[in-house]
Amino acid sequence: MTFDGIVTRAITHELQEDLKSGRIMKIYQPTNTELVFTIRSQGKNKTLLLSAHPSYSRFHLTDDSYQNPSEPSMFCMLLRKHLTGSFITNIEQYENERIVTFHIKGKNEIGDETEKTLVIEVMGKHSNILLIDHEKGHILDSIKHVPPAQNRHRTILPGQAYVLPPDQDKLNPVTTDTDTFRKKMDLNAGKLDQQIVQTFMGVSPLLAKEIVYRAHLGTLETYQKAFTDIQTTVQAHAYQPTIFKEDKEYFYVLPLSQLKNDHEVFPSVSVMLDAFYSGKAERDLVKQQAGDLLRFLKNEREKNIRKIKKQEQTLKKAEKAPMYQRNGELLTANMHAVKLGDKNTTVIDYYDPDQKEITIELNPNKTPSENAQSYFKTYQKLKKSKQMVILEIEKAKLEIIYLDELIQQIGEARVQDIEEIREELREQGYLKTKTKHRKKPKKAKKPEPEAFVASNGTTILVGKNNKQNEYVTMRLAARNEIWLHTKDIPGSHVVIRDPDPDQETLVEAAQLAALFSKAKASSSVPVDYTQIKHVKKPNGAKPGYVTYDNQKTLFVTPNSALIKQLKPKK
């Protein structure tokens, strides 16, 4: 995890400058591990995200928008009661650990001044956010409760005294002097990067490897210099927030010489963290909520692939139908030469240009006429089965296309899109319909396609599932507006709310169509576009399936940064 003590120090310093004296205006809890604060500071509203997510715990300012539940949680309501309208007086990090305290002053119901502390502990699956009464030192509540049976060192429950996580007896790398560093390092023991991690608090393996890399496997003095150089940079708050793109993405607030590939430098730590984590937590939540759906759809897809293979074998057998017809006709023509009890007969094949003799197998228990009729019946059966098999294969192929669309849609879905996909599968008979006794059915909600704003201000709508696709294309869009879809590739329906968009808007919409498709990782993706009036849904077609004509094609290379760029500003 690269959100170590140094990153914590950098973002704390940044927030101290951005949010000190800021007033907390609104508090939301979009998920069970995340809090969003709207803070009025320096004449602007700023959004602060605090996350105790087990994989993506962090805190920073954000430009992302979050879907809030209709009813706030108990913890969210408690925070609103104690913190709304209060002012942030200080933000401080504990030593070089991933523990940060927001000191907040406000007034209670009778107008007396109160002070609360909001503590965020960024510790992977043990991450937490706690509200503490500053005067009494006890926990008012936390986003995660930890009973004594779960942790003997400290209990995290309302009313309990707040106790810091166990001390690991490590040194603070920001304040450690050079002599202490020399004494703690043992060149003969090797694995200097592991020694650094084990000796200094809040130092990640990534930073430890950077110190070793800068030392070039030299003497203790070169390791000391590499350590001191980083220490000086951190003490001066001379950060360089960067995302490095190696075999996988990394972020850090200092330049890393060991990572030489593509990288992007950001103007602030918050902007970097927002870019790195944007959508990751939501995709993780979607993955959890839609895991069963994805398995079901992939199983259905495999069933159809197996069905096609089986039908193709039947089709191969059906290709022999003319042979059975020929044998029946040859038997009929040579009935006089065949008698009951014969196991076979040899006749001249007058269908063959060379008039060769062939041997026809017979059932000795049947008369010559019954044998001929048996061949004719088999011929008719295979002939009919061939037509049926061709239809079944075509049906299975269309089913696979439909399932591929749904699998792609789950990959791009927001949390609110998953239930619409479930509902569609119920309507199509794939999933059992929920039975609700003696309750009036809820009024169906209108689908909510995702909206983007082109560079010139034009609205672009993107369907994230079939219900949204049909709503955007068949009901919402005007006949002369522009519709886009990746050519022969599963993807979203995209609509430009303008009958005559300029070329830049057209390219941006085509980019979105490519980004929300199965080809989002490809280059030069073909995207068809035409007017809505040329898009039709065939009778009996699966949800989201349409045909279209009068189209033109654009080729674009998807750029994921465009999604954030075109999202409407809050």
Image (cartoon, helix red, strand yellow):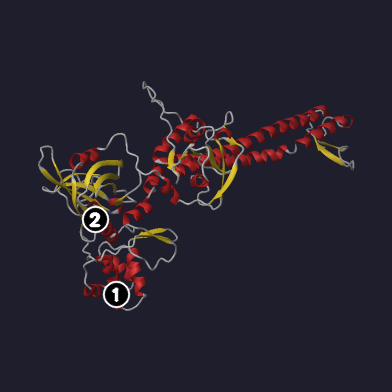
Residue 244 appears in the figure: yes
Q: Residues within 10 Å of mark 1 (few under 14, many from 20)?
A: some
At a point 33% along the width and 59% down the height, the residue shown is 2
Q: Is residue 397 left or right of residue 357?
A: left
- Residue at the top extreme of this rendering: 438
Identify the amino acid type marked 2. Glu
- Name the one closer to the observer, 265 or 346: 265
Q: CA separation, marks 2 and 1?
A: 30 Å
* Label annotation for residue 225: 1
Residue 338: horizontal and vertical position, in percent? 86, 32
> Which secondary structure lies at badge 1?
helix
Picture quarter containing residue 218?
Answer: bottom left
Residue 149 appears in the figure: no
Picture quarter containing residue 228?
Answer: bottom left
Q: Is residue 271 above or below residue 499?
A: below
Q: Earlier in the sequence, mark 2 or mark 1?
A: 2
Q: Is residue 235 left or right of residue 279?
A: left
* Label annotation for residue 359: none
* Label annotation for residue 17: 2
Q: Is residue 422 above or below residue 168?
A: above
Identify the amino acid type marked 1. Lys
Residue 97: horizontal and vertical position, in percent? 24, 59
- Quadrant position of the N terminus in the picture: bottom left
At a point 41% along the width and 48% down the height, the residue shown is 564
Foreground label between 2 and 1: 2
Residue 212: horizontal and vertical position, in percent? 34, 71
At a point 27% along the width and 65% down the height, the residue shown is 234
Q: Is residue 531 above or below residue 64?
A: above
Q: Is residue 434 left or right of residue 325?
A: left
Q: Is residue 558 left or right of residue 187?
A: right
> Which secondary structure lies at badge 2?
helix
At a point 59% along the width and 31% down the height, the residue shown is 538
